[in-house]
Image: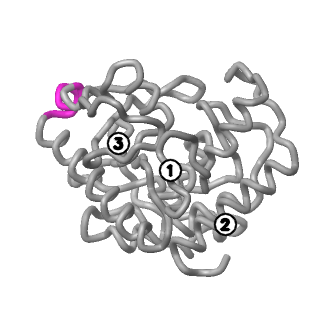
């Protein structure tokens, strides 16, 4: 195999003309990789993504060739994938107000140029899910909000419209299914690429604890931070240390590592109905 790219969480290899996407146990917050891994994280993300890819295939094709035909040593945390030309847009859908979306709303009254009602608070459910794209910044830099019109200017009206449609349909399908299982999906980020014939294809990961905010539905209460089954827990810990969000990041204490792993496992088990 040939290593093509090492990202914040995933390593990308070439093997027999295919792409081998390997999910590590690394965790990043504020676009910085923390020095402490979360055990089993890569396997959980891989297994949950594969579960979702099957349930979204009628909305958009995905990059999966095989989850078993992978090189020795990578079993359980790697996927053999189609090679894609990734669209340089982070495609984000938001159904609730949190994180950078909340910060942008408080500053502008809108997110990615989408005007939102006055008076929303942290955790508010939006009238309807919205498409809030960002740039796809290089490792170590920060993504920035862009408008749908910016995506049109970059990718053309037809592709931009499809990016928005796919993102919102993936979010709605995922949010509806998860809600039945006691999980609120507040927002999610997906990545889309072009296959060799120009078809738009869902790649990377989908509806995982790294790419989404998962909240317990029975504890959702607007106006305060929500209990999270995702890496927001690690973000909150990192923020509380006084860290300046620049490298080097602080080591993560064992109790935070253990609690984070437990939340990833619980999200997987609640959503899929399968035991880890």
- In magenta, the rendered stretch is 150-156
Q: Does the magenta segment cover residue 12?
A: no
Residue with the mark numbered 1: 221
Residues 61 and 118: in front is 118
Magenta part mainly helix, strand or loop?
Answer: helix
| Position above or below: 239 against 36 | above
**Element assignment for label 3:** strand
The answer to whether residue 17 of the structure is visible from this angle is no
Q: Which residue is mark 2?
A: 265
Question: Cβ–Cβ below 8 Å for labels 3 and 1?
Answer: no
Looking at the picture, how far across and down is residue 78, in whole percent?
59, 63
Residue that appears at 66% across and 70% down: 75
Q: Is residue 3 left or right of residue 80?
A: right
Q: Which of the 4 image quarters holds residue 263? A: bottom right
Q: Quadrant of the N terminus?
A: bottom right
Residue 69 can be seen, yes or no:
yes
Q: Quadrant of the C terminus?
A: bottom right
Q: Who's the residue at 79% across and 38% down the image?
A: 35
Q: Residue furthest right?
A: 254
Q: Is 147 situated left or right of 266 in this image? A: left
Crowding at mark 2 (Cα within 10 Å: few <14, some 14-19, many 20+)? many
Q: Position of residue 273 (x, y in %)?
A: 54, 80
Q: Is residue 243 left or right of residue 210?
A: right
Q: Secondary structure at mark 1?
A: loop
* Count of numbered labels shown in the rendering: 3
Q: Nearer the viewer, mark 3 or mark 1?
A: 1
The reply to whether the C-beta atoms of the residues labelled 3 and 2 are less than 8 Å apart is no
Q: CA distance from mark 2 to mark 1?
A: 23 Å
Residue 150 rendering spot, x and y as whole percentages: 23, 25
> Is the residue 84 above or below the residue 120 in the image?
below
From the image, tell me which residue sits under label 3: 91
């Amino acid at each position: 195999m040939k290593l093509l790219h090492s990202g914040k969480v995933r390593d990308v290899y070439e093997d027999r003309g295919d792409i081998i996407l390997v999910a590590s146990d690394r965790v990043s917050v504020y676009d910085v990789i923390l020095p402490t891994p979360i055990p089993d994280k890569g396997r959980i993300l891989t297994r949950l993504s594969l579960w979702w890819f099957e349930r979204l295939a009628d909305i958009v094709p995905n990059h999966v060739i095989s989850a078993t035909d992978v090189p020795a040593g990578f079993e359980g945390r790697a996927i053999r994938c189609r090679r894609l030309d990734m669209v340089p847009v982070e495609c984000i859908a938001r159904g609730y107000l949190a994180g950078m979306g909340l910060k942008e709303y408080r500053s502008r009254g809108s997110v990615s140029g989408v005007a939102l009602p006055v008076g929303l608070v942290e955790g508010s459910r939006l009238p309807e899910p919205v498409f809030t794209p960002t740039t796809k910044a290089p490792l170590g830099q920060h993504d920035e909000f862009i408008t749908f019109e910016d995506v049109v200017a970059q990718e053309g009206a037809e592709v931009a419209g499809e990016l928005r449609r796919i993102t919102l349909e993936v979010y709605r399908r995922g949010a509806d299914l998860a809600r039945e299982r006691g999980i609120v999906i507040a927002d999610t980020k997906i990545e889309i690429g072009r296959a060799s014939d120009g078809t738009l294809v869902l790649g990377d990961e989908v509806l995982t604890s790294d790419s989404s905010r998962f909240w317990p539905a029975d504890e959702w209460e607007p106006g305060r931070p929500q209990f999270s089954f995702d890496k927001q827990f690690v973000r909150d810990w990192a923020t509380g240390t006084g860290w300046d969000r620049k490298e080097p990041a602080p080591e993560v204490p064992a109790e935070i590592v253990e609690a984070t792993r437990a939340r990833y496992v619980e999200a997987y088990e609640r959503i899929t109905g399968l035991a880890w």
